[in-house]
């Protein structure tokens, strides 16, 4: 992207250099459909302006037909807000007038909201029956820094910070990075917790919901670095310390500003899962001086923060890889040993087996009738063959049959007794 400078103050001479190094970039995951806009980047001897805008793809996923083809509400919102903020800030940010930050924040909110509402009306969106407080028309975040030298020939600068949403503004001083605004989240916490917990953005610019632009002023002593970044730049790193290292580490070996910018972009692209936009302005030192100035901080980060954490991460990864190998080995060996054990275990489940005939204790073969077993053909509770209850006939001495009659010898008198 091109870089534009403010005009210098007429007749003014300063003993401390103003913005000396600046660059910005916009990394889109899908070419021509990235929902971050190009950053604002303006600098001059006594002034500076940098800002980023992140169209909110989840809340602003509605697709509109435009002269450039289908575009999401998030894509359109970030670019509309960018153009409005740049135009308004160029009008109110001047060298000889101390910017009234609260009034400027109110002006930005009103100007952006009007522009978003006008564009939404022109798009003629279809009415939807879907209602959700998570859905917004043309939503975008913003993080912006307006920079003014506090006095002529002074190394003190007034840093005016404006934001809405969870894009961030930072100052990188020689002894560490500082976040200059608070994330607008439904469940706010510290920067490390916010990396681990995906909370919903509670305040962002949009056409159909009320929002506010927050403001803070910080006094800074040159030299320093200012950074505005969307969450695609820092949100996929393990800690805030890693973000500081990602920005500063390439500086120690960079020979050109372009080389420094390219190295940062490469580092972000390797980890991010989102569009990513960044603007960087250095005040009070050229590239060679910055390298010397920040080299000790990079060494400290590596020795005290990112180095130990990265060592632990590598050890953890090795342990997880070893654990995965052991789990797979356990599964493989369990399967192999089961295949050895299985045939005997399942012997009677899959083969047709004959029940051996019992052997009599005396060694004689049992009677066939005694070896019958219960089953469909020989039910165990089958009734025995009927028995003739007719008394057998007696045989006379000469061999002829004689009827046998049972006589009841009980007398009547015995009955009555």
Image (cartoon, helix red, strand yellow):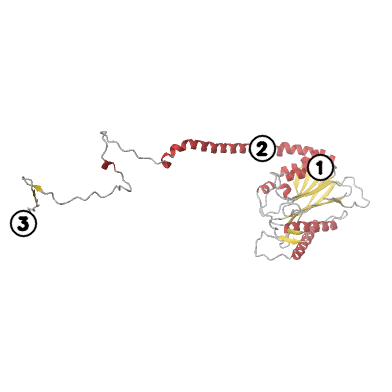
Instruction: Identify the residue shown where x is 31% and y is 48%.
Output: 377
Instruction: Measuring from the top left, give residue 359's x and y in whole percent.
Output: 29, 36
Pick whichever of labels 2 and 1 is earlier in the sequence.
1
Visible residue check, residue 200: yes
Instruction: Measuring from the top left, give residue 151's x and y in whole percent.
Output: 87, 50
Instruction: Measuring from the top left, give residue 250's x and y in whole percent.
Output: 78, 40
Which residue is outermost to the front? 399
The dot on residue 259 is 1
Proximity of marks 3 and 1: CB atoms separated by less than 8 Å: no
Pick whichever of labels 3 and 1 is earlier in the sequence.
1
The dot on residue 314 is 2
Q: Nearer the viewer, residue 319 or 186?
A: 319
Please state if 387 lies on the left or on the right of 295 as rendered: left
Visible residue check, residue 139: no
The secondary structure type at the circle numbered 3 is helix
Residue under label 3, please give it. 413
Cα–Cα gap, marks 3 and 1: 138 Å
Instruction: Measuring from the top left, give residue 56's x and y in whole percent.
Output: 71, 55
Which residue is outermost to the top? 363
């Amino acid at each position: 992207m091109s870089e534009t400078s403010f005009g210098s103050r007429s007749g003014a001479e300063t003993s401390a250099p103003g913005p000396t190094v600046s660059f910005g970039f916009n990394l889109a995951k899908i070419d021509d459909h990235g929902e971050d806009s190009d950053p604002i980047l303006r600098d001059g001897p006594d002034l500076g302006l940098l800002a980023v805008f992140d169209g909110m793809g989840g809340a602003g996923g509605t697709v509109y037909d435009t002269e450039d083809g289908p575009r999401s509400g998030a894509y359109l919102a970030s670019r509309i807000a960018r153009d409005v903020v740049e135009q308004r800030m160029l009008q109110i940010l001047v060298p000889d007038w101390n910017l009234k930050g609260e009034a400027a924040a109110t002006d930005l909110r009103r100007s952006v909201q009007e522009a978003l509402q006008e564009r939404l009306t022109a798009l003629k969106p279809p009415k939807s029956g879907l209602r959700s407080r998570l859905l917004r028309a043309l939503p975008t975040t913003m993080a912006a820094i307006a920079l003014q030298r506090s006095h002529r020939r002074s190394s003190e600068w007034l840093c005016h910070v404006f934001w809405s949403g969870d894009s961030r503004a930072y100052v990188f001083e020689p002894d560490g990075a500082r976040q200059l605004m608070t994330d607008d989240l439904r469940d706010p916490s510290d920067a490390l917790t916010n990396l681990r917990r995906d909370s919903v953005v509670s305040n962002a610019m949009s056409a159909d919901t009320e929002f506010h632009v927050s403001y803070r002023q910080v006094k800074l002593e040159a030299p320093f670095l200012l950074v505005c970044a969307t969450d695609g730049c820092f949100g996929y790193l393990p800690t805030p310390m890693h973000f500081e290292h990602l920005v500063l580490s390439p500086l120690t070996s960079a020979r050109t500003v372009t080389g420094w910018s390219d190295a940062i972009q490469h580092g972000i692209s390797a980890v991010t899962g989102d569009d990513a936009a960044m603007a960087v302005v250095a005040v009070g030192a050229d590239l060679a001086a910055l390298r010397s100035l920040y080299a000790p901080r990079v060494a400290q980060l590596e020795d005290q923060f990112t180095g130990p954490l990265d060592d632990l991460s590598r050890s953890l990864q090795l342990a997880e890889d070893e654990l995965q190998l052991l789990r797979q080995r356990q599964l493989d060996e369990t399967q192999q040993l089961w295949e050895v054990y299985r045939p005997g275990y399942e012997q009677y489940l899959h083969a047709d087996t004959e029940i051996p005939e019992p052997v009599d204790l005396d060694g004689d073969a049992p009677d066939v009738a005694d070896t019958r077993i219960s089953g469909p053909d020989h039910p165990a509770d089958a009734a025995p063959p009927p028995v003739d209850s007719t008394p057998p006939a007696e045989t006379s001495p000469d061999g002829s049959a004689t009827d046998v009659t049972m006589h009841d010898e009980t007398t009547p008198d015995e009955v009555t007794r």
